[in-house]
Amino acid sequence: MPLIRISNSVLTFIRATVRPPVRRFLDAIRRMTELNERQAMPANEIFRTLPEQIAARLQQDILGGHLKPGEPLREADLSEHFGVSRGPVREAFRQLVQQGLLVLEPNKGVRVAQTPSNEMRPLVVQLRRAIEVYVLESIFDRITDGDIDTWQAILNDIRTACESNDLNALTNYDLRFHQAIVKSHDDRDLFTLWQPIAMRMMMQYNRLEDIMDSYREHERILDAIRARDRKAAIEALSTNIQ
Amino acid sequence: MPLIRISNSVLTFIRATVRPPVRRFLDAIRRMTELNERQAMPANEIFRTLPEQIAARLQQDILGGHLKPGEPLREADLSEHFGVSRGPVREAFRQLVQQGLLVLEPNKGVRVAQTPSNEMRPLVVQLRRAIEVYVLESIFDRITDGDIDTWQAILNDIRTACESNDLNALTNYDLRFHQAIVKSHDDRDLFTLWQPIAMRMMMQYNRLEDIMDSYREHERILDAIRARDRKAAIEALSTNIQ
DNA sequence: ACAACAAGGATTGTCAACAAAATACACTTT
DNA sequence: AAAGTGTATTTTGTTGACAATCCTTGTTGT
């Protein structure tokens, strides 16, 4: 599947051709989709940059286990596969290195990172809990009904994934759920801090006996938020992260 | 000052010319210097890659306050300044983005990151403490006299910086001290996790009344380690991080 | 006066060609 | 055999040219 690249060429052309009210309308749409994407909506890839699209696909391949830890990734292969030059692929690699999904060795390229050791897991859990609890505490009084709706939509996706026993999709939506919460904090820097930590947990997604538990845990979080029960929400969030 | 670029051209020539025993000897030296650099020895820039050298300089400029938060950095300016093309500069930017020192906006370039808000500081302190305490606990029984010597050398630099009241150098060596400890853990991934968190603290280095306190705190840590007093070492480390 | 618009320069994004480095392999020597 | 050596291949690093985007400024129309 080739990448969707409407944004640059076509959109610029349209923008230049069309009357200003329509132009502003297009910009508004663009802004909205960008915002939605930021809030972890179903990925609308049209307006994203090339490297982001590539990184997003590779991320799914890694978290989905199609790319095994230690496996080397070649710039030339992927640039051919995606039909772009090596530049954007390189850039995508760097983004994934930042997320901790790839490891970079100078002059040798990148490999898929090893899943964190079991010994290290408690530390990662502790770190992620600290951040997410801090975020939830911090935003709790400013959570809008719109936020809750957004999160509910993701929760529905989690339910579907659980019911169809699709671990791959579940990992994805679980990530999106927590991502949406962290991103709703004003300070974008928190997300930057949180992402590499959370990724390391997503790489070993095998904690639950019953996959349905994942849905129930997230439901508990959102229900508590909806009831504006601060303490219960934080407790539920905290037990979900382990 | 132009970047030192001996490694590639000259070294390759030598390697190709010279007899294999010497060749391996050169490789050994190379490996050693790389290792030393990894353990935060005085920066031997000769064997580093171009982007790493650039990133190292920019890092000092940012932590030293010569580049103010919010200030935009232009690829073209720096590529001219360092006498390289935009590619390596771009790469250096990405490394610094990973460290949290720069912020990237697509199509708009990078800016120096804002120092973390005061509200957020306790969280960052908590995260950094968690990691460093974990590391120290984890490596404690395997710390060699060689390690201690290395750290003592950095401690001496800290003392010098404190005595000459050079806050800039102090920031640098403080970073190196903790970096050396974290890097001595087998799991390199811990360093990747730790770095962006620690950087955010280094960006606001203004905690101490008396600058000499910094030396005393680090001295306490190393003394406790030298005495193999686990509890005291962790306590000292923990109070140093705030 | 004020919004809509257009043109220009400045800056980042992408590309393809080339350089440097790492790797693999066949060949030699001891 | 086993290590030493040279060459060819593969892969990443670097460069400069060009394209797309952003931003500023001046102009037009109402």
Image (cartoon, coloured by chain):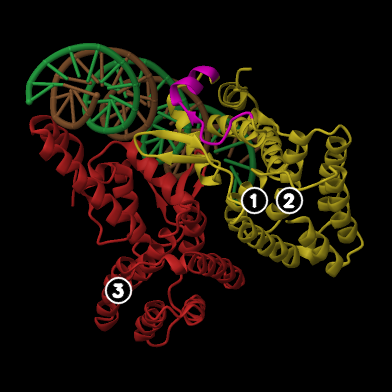
Chain colours: A red, B yellow, C brown, D green
Instruction: Examine the rendered structure and indicate whether residue B186 appears above or below residue B213.
Output: below
Q: Label 2 crowding class (10 Å Cα cut-off): few <14, some 14-19, many 20+? A: some
Which span is picked out in magenta?
A: B66-81
Where is residue B133? Give x, y as percent.
72, 64
**Which residue position is annotated with label 1?**
B198
Secondary structure type for disc 3? helix
The answer to whether residue B70 is magenta is yes
Q: How many marks?
A: 3
Horizontally, residue B117 falls left or right of residue D9, namely right
Quadrant housing the N terminus of chain B: top right
Horizontally, residue B230 falls left or right of residue D10, namely right
- Mark number for residue B178? 2
* Quarter of the rendering containing residue B169: top right
Are discs 3 and 2 less than 8 Å apart at CB?
A: no
**Residue at 50%, 61% in the rendered image:** A114
**Which residue position is annotated with label 3?**
A152
Where is residue B191? Give x, y as percent.
62, 53
Residue nearest the observer in this picture, B44 or B205: B205
* Quarter of the rendering containing residue B17: top right
Instruction: Examine the rendered structure and indicate whether residue B190 appears above or below residue A125.
Output: above
Residue flagged by tag 2: what amino acid is it?
A: His
Residue flagged by tag 3: what amino acid is it?
A: Gln
- Mark number for residue A215? none
Where is residue B115? Give x, y as percent.
59, 44
**Residue at 58%, 22% in the rendered image:** B13
Residue flagged by tag 1: what amino acid is it?
A: Ala
Label 3 – label 2 distance at C-alpha: 43 Å
Instruction: Examine the rendered structure and indicate whether residue B196 appears above or below residue B68.
Output: below
Chain of the residue under label 3? A
Chain of the residue under label 2? B
